[in-house]
């Protein structure tokens, strides 16, 4: 089949975790013989911020070298030839970080008889926390929504934003996120994540900064959008702030670390049960023991307590980190279990299987369902 993706960015993962998952999806589709075309606005905020980093231009070159099989077409939204972009498409997938005008124009093409199937891909919490933002999107002519959690899927149906929606979780690109057996630990703890726009400041203190300080751990943090007070708090806990790191370098950093933590943003805990975000999938795929602040695994994605540890407060986080760092057998067994679950259920290959099934359900041109009906 011929897929066209309209994305915010394929190559820049500066504060843009969807790029991690998107690259894995596109590469897996291409490996299976599908043609994929990706388009992104030339002035997208993630790409612009990445290039503004001191190492941004060099990092972009490094990303291109790491993913030589990927390409993305930059376009000026005011000059985009949408008919040319859609020419020959069987399935069009549009990420939610796109302008409402583009969404409306794509819907108009589909409504006017476009033979392609049109899907909206939501990987954020705005449907719950900022419904007025999402209501600006006219999805009436779309064939459905790919929602990165059941709570988000239900929201689209309940609000009448879409007639059809599928739960389509993120997953790990296991061609990149894999254990690093040659790496030697150089630190006790690593955390890769952004400060969080005040959506988890209290939680970061409780589940990351305070336990590191109490245990006197050797710890590094990578991420962006850290305010001065955030950097000062890290320093006061003895944590080194390392700035932005391109995502394809994260597996090596995990391999050089003995343990990591997951600190979900408050909207995911309070309103979006069952959505862990992509960092959990990626960490477990690298075979590093993980301890998580509380969230509800409402969809049974993992074997909580075996694949990773879930703790309810800072004292329990401190105790769990201490145990994993002191008991190498327990740490190795937890890492083994987490990796086992990722490889069994949560790779980009699994998600492509699901996506192709959705395409067949919709009768997309070139899907196996359509071919079976013809034969």
Image (tube, rainbow, N blue to C red):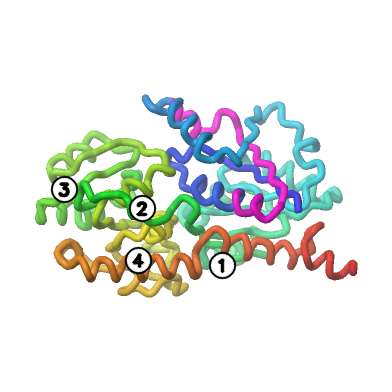
Q: Which residue does the numbered mark 4 point to in the structure image?
A: 295
**Residue drawn at x 51%, y 35% as measured from the top left:** 65
Q: Which residue does the numbered mark 3 point to in the structure image?
A: 218
Sequence-earlier tag: 4 or 1: 1
Spatial CA distance of label 1 from label 2 is 38 Å
Foreground: disc 4 or disc 2: 2
Closer to the camera in the image, 177 or 12:
177
Residue 267 visible in the shown view = no
Sequence-earlier tag: 1 or 3: 1
Q: Secondary structure at mark 2?
A: loop
Question: Number of numbered discs present?
Answer: 4
Sequence-earlier tag: 2 or 3: 2
Spatial CA distance of label 4 from label 2 is 28 Å
Tag 1: Cα neighbours inside 10 Å, few (<14), some, or many (≥20)? some
Q: Is residue 203 left or right of residue 59?
A: left
Q: Secondary structure at mark 4?
A: loop
**Residue drawn at x 77%, y 61% as measured from the top left:** 367
Circle 4/circle 3 CB separation < 8 Å:
no
Q: Secondary structure at mark 3?
A: loop
Q: Which residue does the numbered mark 2 point to in the structure image?
A: 180
Q: Which mark is residue 154?
A: 1
Quadrant in the picture for the C terminus: bottom right
Tag 3: Cα neighbours inside 10 Å, few (<14), some, or many (≥20)? some
**Residue drawn at x 38%, y 27% as measured from the top left:** 55
Spatial CA distance of label 2 from label 3 is 20 Å
Residue 353 visible in the shown view = yes
């Amino acid at each position: 089949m011929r897929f066209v993706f309209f994305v915010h960015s394929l190559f820049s993962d500066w504060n843009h975790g969807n790029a991690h998952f998107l690259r894995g999806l596109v590469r897996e589709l291409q490996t299976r013989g599908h043609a994929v075309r990706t388009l992104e606005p030339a002035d997208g905020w993630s790409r612009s911020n990445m290039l503004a980093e001191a190492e941004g231009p060099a990092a972009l070159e490094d990303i291109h070298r790491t993913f030589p099989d990927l390409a993305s077409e930059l376009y000026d939204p005011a000059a985009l030839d949408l008919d040319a972009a859609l020419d020959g498409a069987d399935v069009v997938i549009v990420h939610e970080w796109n302008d409402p005008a583009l969404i409306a124009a794509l819907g108009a093409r589909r409504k006017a008889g476009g033979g392609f199937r049109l899907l909206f891909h939501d990987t954020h919490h705005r449907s719950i926390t900022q419904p007025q933002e999402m209501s600006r999107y006219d999805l009436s002519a779309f064939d459905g929504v790919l929602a990165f959690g059941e709570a988000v899927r239900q929201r689209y149906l309940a609000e009448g934003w879409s007639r059809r929606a599928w739960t389509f979780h993120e997953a790990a690109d296991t061609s990149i996120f894999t254990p690093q057996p040659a790496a030697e630990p150089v630190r006790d703890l690593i955390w890769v994540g952004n400060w969080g726009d005040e959506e988890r400041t209290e939680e970061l203190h409780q589940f990351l900064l305070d336990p590191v300080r109490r245990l006197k751990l050797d710890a590094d943090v990578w991420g962006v959008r850290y305010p001065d007070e955030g950097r000062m708090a890290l320093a006061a806990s003895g944590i080194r702030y390392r700035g932005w790191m391109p995502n394809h370098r994260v597996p090596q950093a995990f391999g050089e670390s003995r343990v990591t933590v997951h600190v979900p943003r408050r909207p995911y805990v309070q309103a979006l049960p069952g959505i862990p975000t992509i960092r959990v999938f990626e960490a477990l795929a690298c075979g590093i023991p993980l301890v998580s602040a509380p969230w509800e695994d409402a969809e049974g994605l993992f074997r909580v307590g075996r694949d990773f540890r879930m703790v309810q407060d800072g004292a329990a986080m401190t105790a769990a980190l201490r145990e994993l760092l002191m008991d190498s057998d327990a740490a190795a067994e937890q890492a083994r279990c987490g990796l086992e679950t990722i490889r069994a259920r949560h790779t980009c290959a699994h998600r492509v299987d699901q996506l192709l099934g959705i395409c067949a359900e919709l009768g997309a041109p070139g899907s196996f369902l359509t071919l079976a009906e013809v034969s």
